[in-house]
Amino acid sequence: MQINRLFEILYILLDKKTATSKELAERFEVSPRTIYRDVEILSAAGIPVYMRKGKRRERLN
């Protein structure tokens, strides 16, 4: 369920501060693109979550 995933992403980022889209996708058994969409939803809701491109992979902050 998407709302549960959104809250869990927030809790993970609050705890770890950063995570890769691949790590989150594997944890929730979804594609990295789904994680990107989730981050966009959180950002649109006013939650300060953003992505930055890394050397080999994108990291979520």
Image (cartoon, grey):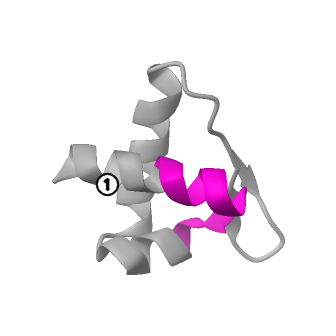
Q: Is residue 17 above or below residue 29?
A: above
Closest to the observer: 29 or 10? 10
Give the tally of numbered discs: 1
Q: Would you place residue 17 above or below residue 50 in this image?
A: below
Magenta span covers which residues? 10-22
3 magenta-colored: no
Residue sitting at x 48%, y 69%: 24
- Name the residue at 36% across, 46% down: 6
Amino acid on which disc 1 is placed:
Arg
**Mark 1 falls on what kind of element?**
helix
Which one is nearer the viewer's eye here, 7 or 29?
7
Q: 26 and 37: which one is in front?
A: 26
The image quadrant of residue 47 is top right
Which residue occupies 53% across, 19% down? 46
Q: Position of residue 5 (x, y in %)?
A: 31, 54
Task: Name the spot of residue 58 as percent of width and height, x first.
Answer: 68, 63
From what the image shows, is residue 45 above or below residue 6? above
Identity of the residue furthest to the left in this view: 1
Q: Using the rendered view, name the quadrant where residue 45 is placed.
A: top left
Image position, residue 10 (x, y; %): 50, 47
Placement of 3 over or under 1, stated as above or below: above
Q: Is 44 displayed left or right of 1 in the figure?
A: right
Give the residue pinned by disc 1: 5
Quarter placement of the N terminus: bottom left
Q: Residue at x 62, y 38 (%)?
A: 49
